[in-house]
Every structure is written in C-alpha cells, then in structure tokens.
Image (cartoon, rainbow, N blue to C red):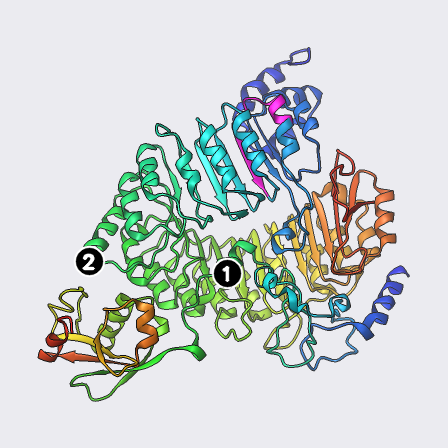
C-alpha cells in the first residue's frame, strides 16, 4: 500500500515510533510535516476520530486511511441534546457503514455520538464485520432494543456494549438473552439507560461467564438483592453502575451487600444509585476510600446523607450530584474531598415553578475553599454573584472547564443587580488554561471583551441570552485563537457579527447560532465568500423566521446530499 | 455603520417583543439588556401539553408580571432529554407534605414529621429511633418488633391502631393519621396479627 518513496532515516524512525502515538491530534500533526510523513502516518493509523460526520465523506476517509480498526463519529450539533434541532435532521450512520463494510471488513470498534442509527443499521453492522468487538452509542436516536438483539446475536467477539442516554424505543429486555450460551468475552456492559426488564437469570449467567468484565452498569430495574448476587461473580470490577438502591434490607442482606462491595478491590467508579437511601449507602463504606468517581446524579440525596457518605470518600476526584444536597451538602464536599478535580451539580427540578431549594453561590464557594485542585465544574444554580465567582477562581485557578448555568435567563448578580460580566472576567483572567466556558446570567459585551482578551486557550464557548451588540461576538472571534466550537442562542448578534468571522470559521469545527439577529443576506454572503464552509439554515416549523437556526461548519465533502427539506444549504 | 442599522432594526421590533428581563427594569437601557426576540412564539399551544412535558416546548407568556411566573423556553436550562425524562421523584415537597404527629409513651411532648421525606419503613424507623433515643429494631411479619420493648403504631383512616410495617409503604403513607410509639406489654399485644 505504501507509495514508493525514498526511505530516509527519519521515515524509518517514524515507522518505529508511530505505533506508540495514539492521540489523533498528535497524528494529525505528524501528517502535516511533509508528504512522506503523511503517507507513513496514514497507513499506520488504526483509529480515526471524526468530530463532524459532515466534514468529510466516508469515501474520503477510506481513501486516506486504509487500515482502520476503530472509528469514532459525532453527528448532530450539541444543541440537539436540548431539542433545538428538529427530528430527521440527519447524521445517519448507514452510509458510513456501507463504506466501512467494503473498505474495513475487519473493523473492530464503533463509537457514535449524536448520530441517527436504525435497527437495520445495527443488523447490518452485526452481520458485516466478523471481528467486531466494541459498540458505544451515546445520545443517539433511531433504534430500538430490537437492534441490540442483532448485536448480541451476531457479534461473537463482542467485548464492549455501551448504551448511554439514547433516545430509543425501549421495547423489551429480550436482547440480553440473545447472547449465545457460551459467549464469555464481555469486558464492558452498560445498559443503565434502558428501562425495560432483562432476565436476571440470563444476566447473572452472563456476568458469571465473563471473567474479564471490568465495567458493569445495570438499569434501575435490578434490585439491591440482585446486585449483591451479581457482585459475587465480579470482584474484578473497576466501574459499577448499580440499579435501584432503595430496597429495604434486613441486617443479613445488608451485611452480604457490604461484604460484596468489600470484595471488589479494584472498584474505582460507582454510578446508578437510583433513589439511594442513606442506610443503603452505608454498604459502600468498605470501598469508599478507593473511589475516584462517584455519580450520585440519580440519587436525590439530602445534605446530611451526602455528608455521611463523603466522610468516607477522601480520595474522590470526580463527583456528580443533584442540587437536592443544597449548599450544606456542598460544604461537606469541600471538607471531605481535598483531591476533587471535577464537580457537576445537576438540578433536580428545574421546571418547578415553586422551586425553593437548590444550590446557590455559597455552595460553590464552599467547594472551592476545600477543593483547590478543581479543574472542571458544571453548576446549575438559582442565583450567583460576581464576588462569589471571583473568589472561586482565586481559590481554583486551574479550571479547564467552567460551565455555569444560572437557570433564570439573563439574571444579574442578585446582590448588586449588576451584570455578571465581572464574574466571567475573573474566570478568564485567572484561569489561564481554560478550554471550555459556558456563560449564563445577565451579560453585556464586556464579558466578550474579556473573553477575547484573556481566554487564549479557549476551545469551546456556549452562549445564551447574552451580549448587547455585534461587537461581543466579534471580539471572541478575533481574540480566541484556539476556538473550535462556538454555540450561541438567543443573543443580539447579527450579520455583521457573523461576517466578522470570515477568516475564522475554517479553523473551527463549527458555529451554531439560533434565535439571533441573522438574516438570509448575511448568511448568503458568508456562503459566497467561503465556499469551503457549509452554511445551513434550518427552517423552523413553529416560527416563520427564515434564519432562526444557522449551522456553519468546514467541510471537504461539499454541501450535504442527504439534507431534509427543512435544511437549506446556502 | 452596518451594525448601527441592525441595532436600529432590533429596536424597531421592540414594540412586539416580549422581554425576559427582570420586572421593573428600565426600558431605555438598550445597551445592557437584550430584548428576547420571541414574538413568533406568541400563542401557547395547549394541545401540545403532552409533548411539552418531555420536551419543554416553548410556551411564552408575558414575563413582565410576577417574578414567580417562569415560562418554559425550549432547551433551557440545558439538560439532556434523558436526564429530564428520568428525574428521580422528589423527596421533600413542603407544601404537599404528609405531616403526622408522633407521640411516645412516657414522653412529655409530641413531635411532628413529614412522612414524604422518608423512603420507606427502614428510613422512618431509623429516624424515630434517632428522634426519641431508643431502639425499635427490625420488623418481621410474624413477630412484629420482637426484641424491642417499643412498637411503632399508627392510627389509620378508620380510627384503628395498627402496627407500623404491616401494609405497603405507599398505603401506609396515605392512611396514617398519626403515630404512637407504644411501650411494654401494650406493644407486645399488638404484634400478634390483630
């Protein structure tokens, strides 16, 4: 397959080194050094990452990389997660699978995010690739549990089945029973987001046979008693997603559960914990000190229950909770988990008109006081102040991901009534390694001035209900050299702002703008000036607005050939 | 120049725009406040209520009024559908709590608890043990609370005194009028399938 090139010493060395280079960013850099490096790299690449399925065609991928075993594909814009992208928009994986079947018959792994996947596609996948081993589907739609039956039935070498938070037709749990009786190769099994019952006997047998199982995440229909029986077979587990955690246990049952956890000497991640009670959480104490990631975002705990548990979790690096723990619970986080690097606080009842609980700025400050190594925060709250955020980032200057969601749109600092500009100004000034930022609250162009001036490593920016004029967006486009993804909704940015990024968009993955001040004129101008960008206008059924939603992305594949009628390529 | 025109266009739409700012905010503060442009989504779609539960469809109302009236905006707050559709049932709902008095034989005053705060009998009993500094132990269908000198009982809707734990939790929550922690022989009498 190598084109005949004059082999220099450097190429020989490169060939030795390349198998050790797995990061796609590094490999992309290698391929840009010179033509020889490009050719050596492309033949040796086995894993390909395609961040936007419309940026390139499957044929182009197959032409460039002949020896791919693993593909990661991402489809819809992220705002699809929040219902901003109409159904049947696209990102169907099937055309990719057809090409892969021809060029990569030995494909082993497929990881999809925000793609549309039909049952027929899953069946095609299962029957076309004899070596297929790992399937991961996250935020996908279009398939049902019938499709999973095909995977279980035909993929004899399957090691990973990871079904995460998809919008699917959950018909039945029979798919689990489709694994052959001698099938024993699973290492990862995650069906936590499926709501139908699987046969427990089948699950127990399967888990018992798969001695290499390291990740097991069951759904909430699995009871505590059943979980204990599973754990007996899986002392080697590294990641566990429990089922329902609120069954009332008699002392003997509790002891057995506790002992089962104690036996899992490698357990570092626990999730699930549906409706956990503090009594039952005590069963985790034997493993708590070993935990690095605890996902309590489906257990609506009160502050005391969280505090009790966290007292045992001194080594935690990542914690996800619901805001039912309130500020008091977050104080416990600050005092118990000094090594914490990531905190996510989700709202338990954001659509509640009468919501009077939740977390405030004090909770976040309390965490920052105790957890100085914090790098990642996702925080949904009802109120915030500029001072609090300034304090937080002074305590924790190492933030790489700062995602703050003050849930009332355009809400100012509740103490001073001022915009939240200074808060985000403090974030970008203090956190020099910031890669991802999500804004909220009342914000003027000043916020964007700060971002453009200080956030030099910023890659992803999410903006909603913010800004005063085109200048805001312009300052970000001009000031952030590493910007890759910009997603904007409900902001007063118009055509001038859009066009100020003419020289920028080809260096980015994508731009999303919805409910802003764009007109067809501006969008057409952009499309005309930059033919290598796909400028797509999504016509919304509900509004008459022509340019309510605009999606702009660089592409080598030209305009989409599969666009539905409501997606207009300019 | 262009940007000024566009701003003026925006200002002209002001007459039909519905604002999302806080009430009482000065209309003339055009620089700092963005007027949320949602004149298109004027009419609430009452027939789409079913979908809106799962999808939080936009139902825009007039936001100038009470601060408590929060309209639902499509895709806000930004929470993935899966998480929205799988919110765990809320534990504490103060206005709709089920408050019952709890008395204990020999104790000088009563307590009041909200049954909705507890996940089940075990949760409730641990709370009672903690509240009254005693040991109730575990429930068994045949023997009640044998092994403890206390038995938690409750008065149901029919005015009868029942042993706590006999009926499913949900049924208990809806029929319990008040609790009484009985002591001594009275307690033992109640534990035998009355």
- The label on residue A251 is 2
Mark 1 neighbour class, 10 Å CA radius: few under 14, some 14 to 19, many 20 or more: many
**Judging from the image, what secondary structure is the residue with disc 2 in?**
helix
Q: Which residue is mark 1?
A: A346
Q: Mark 1 or mark 2, which is nearer to you?
A: 2
Classify B75 as above or below B104: above
Residue at the extreme bottom of the image, as rendered: B108
* Nearer-the-camera pick, A197 or B179: A197
Mark 2 neighbour class, 10 Å CA radius: few under 14, some 14 to 19, many 20 or more: few
> Magenta segment: does it hold A102?
yes
Residues drawn in magenta:
A99-113
* Residue at the image point whose x is 43% and y is 74% from the top: B93
**Residue A190: x, y in percent?**
44, 42
Residue at the extreme right of the image, as rendered: B1
**Considering the image in quadrants, where does the N terminus of chain A appear?**
top right
Write down the chain letter for disc 2. A
* Nearer-the-camera pick, A542 or A509: A542
């Amino acid at each position: 397959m190598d084109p005949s090139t004059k082999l220099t010493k450097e190429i020989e060395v490169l060939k030795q080194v390349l198998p050790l280079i797995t990061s796609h960013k590094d490999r992309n850099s290698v391929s840009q050094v010179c033509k020889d490096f490009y050719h050596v790299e492309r033949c040796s690449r086995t894993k390909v990452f395609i961040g936007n399925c419309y940026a390139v065609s499957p044929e182009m991928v197959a032409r460039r990389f002949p020896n791919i075993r693993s593909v990661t594909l991402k489809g819809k814009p992220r705002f699809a997660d929040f219902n901003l992208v109409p159904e049947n928009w696209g990102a169907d994986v099937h055309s990719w699978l057809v090409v892969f079947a021809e060029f990569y018959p030995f494909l082993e792994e497929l990881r999809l995010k925000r793609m549309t996947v039909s049952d027929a596609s899953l069946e095609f996948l299962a029957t076309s690739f004899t070596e297929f081993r790992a399937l991961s589907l996250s935020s996908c739609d279009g398939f049902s549990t019938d499709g999973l039956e095909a995977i279980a039935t035909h993929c004899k070498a399957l090691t990973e089945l990871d079904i995460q938070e998809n919008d699917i037709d959950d018909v039945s749990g029979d798919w689990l029973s489709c694994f052959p009786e001698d099938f024993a190769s699973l290492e990862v099994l995650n069906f936590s987001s499926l709501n139908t019952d699987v046969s427990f006997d089948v699950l127990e047998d399967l888990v018992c046979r798969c001695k290499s199982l390291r990740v097991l995440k069951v759904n909430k229909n699995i009871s505590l008693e059943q979980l204990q029986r599973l754990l007996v077979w899986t002392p080697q587990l590294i990641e566990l997603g429990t089922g329902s955690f609120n069954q009332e246990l008699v002392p003997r049952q509790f002891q057995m559960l506790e002992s089962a956890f104690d036996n899992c000497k490698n357990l570092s991640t626990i999730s699930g914990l549906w409706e956990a009670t503090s009594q039952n959480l005590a069963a985790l104490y034997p493993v708590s000190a070993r935990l690095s990631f605890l996902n309590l975002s489906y257990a609506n705990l009160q502050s005391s229950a969280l505090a009790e548990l966290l007292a045992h979790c001194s080594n935690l690096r990542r914690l996800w909770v619901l805001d039912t723990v309130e500020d008091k619970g977050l104080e416990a986080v600050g005092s118990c988990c000094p090594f914490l690097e990531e905190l996510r606080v989700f709202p338990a009842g954001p659509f509640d008109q009468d919501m009077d609980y939740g977390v405030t700025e004090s909770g976040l400050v309390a965490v920052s006081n105790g957890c100085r190594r914090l790098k990642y925060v996702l925080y949904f709250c009802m109120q915030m102040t500029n001072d609090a955020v300034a304090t937080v980032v002074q305590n924790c200057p190492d933030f790489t991901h700062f995602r703050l969601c003050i849930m009332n749109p355009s809400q100012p600092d509740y103490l001073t009534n001022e915009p939240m500009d200074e808060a985000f100004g403090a974030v970008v000034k203090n956190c020099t390694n910031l890669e991802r930022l999500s804004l909220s609250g009342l914000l003027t162009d000043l916020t964007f001035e700060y971002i453009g001036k200080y956030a030099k490593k910023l890659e992803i920016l999410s903006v909603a209900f913010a800004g005063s004029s085109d200048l805001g967006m312009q300052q970000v486009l001009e000031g952030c050299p590493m910007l890759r993804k910009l997603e904007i909704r409900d902001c007063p940015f118009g055509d001038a702002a859009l066009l100020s990024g003419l020289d920028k968009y080809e260096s980015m993955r994508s731009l999303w703008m919805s409910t802003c001040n764009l007109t067809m004129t501006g969008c057409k101008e952009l499309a005309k000036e930059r033919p290598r960008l796909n400028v797509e206008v999504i016509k919304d059924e509900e509004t008459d607005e022509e340019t309510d939603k605009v999606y702009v992305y660089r592409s080598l594949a030209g305009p989409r050939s599969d666009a539905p009628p409501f997606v207009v390529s300019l | 120049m262009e940007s000024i025109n566009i701003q003026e266009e925006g200002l002209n739409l002001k007459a039909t725009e519905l604002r999302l700012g806080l009430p009482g905010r000065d209309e003339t503060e055009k620089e700092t406040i963005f007027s949320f442009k949602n004149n298109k989504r004027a009419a609430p779609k009452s027939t789409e209520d079913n979908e809106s539960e799962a999808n939080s469809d936009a139902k825009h109302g007039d936001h100038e009024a009470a601060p408590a009236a929060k309209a639902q905006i499509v895709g806000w707050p930004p929470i993935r559908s899966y998480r929205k559709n799988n919110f765990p049932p809320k534990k504490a709902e103060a206005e709709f709590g089920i408050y019952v008095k709890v008395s204990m034989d020999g104790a000088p005053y009563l307590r009041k608890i909200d049954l909705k705060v507890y996940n089940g009998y075990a949760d409730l009993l641990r709370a009672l043990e903690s509240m009254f500094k005693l040991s109730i132990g575990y429930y068994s269908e045949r023997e009640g609370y044998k092994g403890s000198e206390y038995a938690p009982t409750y008065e149901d809707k029919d005015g009868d005194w029942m042993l706590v734990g006999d009926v499913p939790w949900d049924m208990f929550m809806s029929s319990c009028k008040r609790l009484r922690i009985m002591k001594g022989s009275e307690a033992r009498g109640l534990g035998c399938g009355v």
